[in-house]
Amino acid sequence: MEEAEQHREDLEEYALVLDYLPTGKSFSVRSEPIVQLIGETRFTLLEAVPKNPEIKVEERLYIGKGERDKIALIKSRLTYANLTEGARSELHVAIAKIIKSNEKKFVDFFNNASPLNIRIHALELLPGIGKKHLLAILDAREDKPFESFEDMGKRVSLLQDPIKLLTDRIILELKGDSRFYILTRPPAQPRPY
């Protein structure tokens, strides 16, 4: 029962379009349109078949279990390596857009992140966060939890843009180059084409 609840929790409800291929992939046997998407909740990379051709890059689509407007079916999860060049180039923009639209969730990540083991803290996994920044963030959040990214920038000196830090970490996790997956689902097993 617990596993079924976890599976439901991992399912994406909404996704942003990374790339739209009206005639499918050039090496595909069937010529059907496909869309490559990134989920808003766990940054799951997906490939889907659209219902109609009026889909735009960066468009937010419903992909949940209910009636879908523009997506006929979700074909599969993708790995970063399976993304088209267009989808890869759009990835930074889409992730930053998702983070900005869910600012509270990601500010809460900074407020609630804890050590992963005795040697490493979850915040240290963000590119650009070393021991000095970690201590500054922990001290600042101990005084008062962060309210926004702007608040973080004001209270933690020399901290890089938190949206960029999160985006870089998410892309690293999507590439499958990580031991810890703190912001995404572990990548799908690569499938041969």
Image (spheres, grey):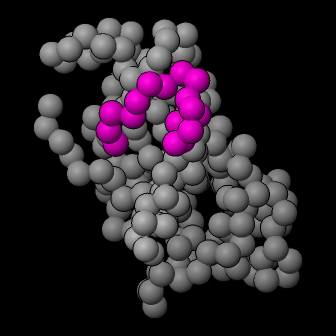
| Residue at the (46%, 91%) spot, across then down | 118
Q: Is residue 15 above or below residue 20?
A: below
| Residue at the (53%, 73%) spot, across then down | 122
Q: Nearer the viewer, residue 58 or 75?
A: 75
Number of marks present in the image shown: 0
Q: Nearer the viewer, residue 125 or 29?
A: 29
Task: State the quadrant of the C terminus.
Answer: top left
Q: Is residue 181 above or below residue 144?
A: above
| Residue at the (54%, 21%) spot, across then down | 70
Q: Is residue 23 visible?
A: yes
Q: Is residue 178 magenta?
A: no
Residue 191: x %, y % from top left: 18, 42
Residue 129: x %, y % from top left: 57, 66
Residue 171: x %, y % from top left: 44, 47
| Residue at the (23%, 51%) spot, across then down | 189
Locate residue 150 relative to residue 38 in the image: left or right: right
Q: Is residue 139 above or below residue 179?
A: below
Residue 169: x %, y % from top left: 49, 55
Task: State the quadrant of the N terminus.
Answer: bottom left
Q: Is residue 132 visible?
A: no
Q: Is residue 66 magenta?
A: yes
Segment colored magenta: 62-77
For residue 50, what is the image quadrant? Answer: top left
Locate residue 28 relative to residue 143 in the image: left or right: left
